[in-house]
Image (cartoon, coloured by chain):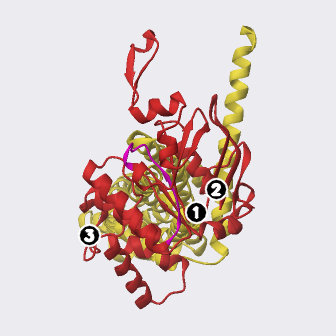
Amino acid sequence: MIRVQGLHKRFGAQEVLRGLDLDIATGEIMVVIGRSGGGKSVLLKHMIGLLRPDAGAILVDGTDITRLRGRALDRVRERYGVVFQGGALFDSMSVWDNVAFPLREKSRRTDAEIRERVEEKLEQVGLGGMGDKDPAEISGGMRKRVAIARALVTEPEIVFFDEPTTGLDPILVNTIHHLIVDLHRKFRFTAVMVSHEIPEIFEIADRVAMLHDGTIVEVGPPEAVRGSAKAVVQQFIRGDVETVPAEHGGRRETR
Amino acid sequence: MWPAPLRPIAALGHLSLEIVQSLGRFGRFFLQAAGYTVIPPFKLGRLIDRVHFIGFRSLTIVVLTGAFTGMVLGLQIFLTLSRFGSEAYLGPAVALSLIRELGPVLCAVFVTGLAGSALTAEIGIMKITEQIDALQVMALNPIRYLVVPAIVAGIITFPLMVSIFDVVGILGGYLVGVELLGLSPGTYFGEMKTFVDWSDLMTGYWKALSFGIIVPWVCTYKGFNCGHGAEGVARATTQAVVLSSVLILVWDYFLGSVLP
């Protein structure tokens, strides 16, 4: 279980997280939604230990990872898989080597075991036989799938997805979402996903949390969030056009 | 807000603090890398890759610039010495200039332009595309993975490249002095044996070794601390080449004044 407690983070004058609380149950798909630039990725980077909060705690099965350093933090990270927004594939390596990389570096498996596992993961994401390609040679959707295969190759307990479908067409968005759900059914990992793909994420999430103004303003099953009485939630879900002061150019679309 | 008369003093204070902080970060980065150099696990595969990246890929430029540096030295020193009737000292003059000074310095500056800039750009792009974050969340230390192999590769390859630069340069001087200007081969090499001793060679190698640390250190540091987007990487690359070149010359003067 992941428990985020009173998380505060400020970058210069801008306070991005203002005492954020969120509980993520073991084995669920939790999707954090919210406006672009609203702090979703910042929250995710705290959970994977890339940023340290100004105040607050992140408990992973009772251990506050914000206080961990070095080897102790690495031991927690060994239970993680992370799919970055742009894939973050190593462009000096082939697709196959990218997926094999975590196993080669962090496990004592033999070459034959690694080969078997990598082939299996590439098959599971629909990229069997594509291992020889370089990341630069494949499409955006394929890169996301390679990133998912790499994140899952160590069979992690918790997988973080940072906007895994950004920049993809609607068909690919659904393809990637279904792939995540299929893999989740098969491996039962805890999934924490940051996204603003409305309404698609309501189909795949066990619970949805809406991040606004540095805090979670609504959290619950998709239907409950969809039916929320809070204006800010409804405005985001419907994609209402918001009014901005005249000096900033009048009206602007929210999404 | 400071009162107007005090603002220049406050700005000076901020600037001083910023310089001290960035020097501290620069030093801490090196100390971390130095620590991981002696603490296992060692990334042998990465080291071989970096030796190829820094050393092998720079060989052409090292041979080419070494040859022409030696030829220019051969010509200019011959013309100068001939005014005093001392052409016989061309060999040692070329060899000493190359071994003690020009070999390590020019070689380091050229390798900075070629491999150092590529090192900064590569790490900078890895940073802006979250590849360094990916290493971290895989529980791999990016300094151990990206910086240590580059610095160790610099320590291995710089003395070798400087040796090649010196030998090719001396042969370049031979080509001009002996083959074109008519000095006898025996005089060129014989006088060299008389005047060049072990301490000259060691001076050159100490310089090469230290430049082999400075260049990868500066270039990887700048890559790790580059700004956002393509502009950030471009700026970091320029800064890495300029700072490395300046540090090479400053450190060369310092070593030149303390070494025999």
Of the numbered discs in the image, which one, if any, rests on residue A133?
3
Residue at image point 45% right, 51% down: B124
> Mark 1 highlights which residue?
B143
Give the position of the C terminus of chain A as an image quadrant: top left
Which residue is nearer to you in this view: B104 or B224?
A: B224
Residue A132 coordinates in the image, percent (x, y): 27, 74
Q: Amino acid at mark 3?
A: Lys
The chain carrying label 2 is: B
Q: Residues within 10 Å of mark 3 (few under 14, many from 20)?
A: some
Same chain, labels 3 and 2? no
CB contact under 8 Å: marks 2 and 1? yes
* Left or right: residue A158 compared with residue A183: right
Which residue is nearer to you in this view: B145 or B150?
A: B145
Residue B210 coordinates in the image, percent (x, y): 59, 63
Can residue B152 be seen here? The reply is yes
Residue B88 quadrant: bottom left
> Mark 2 highlights which residue?
B29
Residue A218 versus residue B117 in the image, above or below: above
Residue at image point 32% right, 52% down: A173
- The region drawn magenta spans A188-200
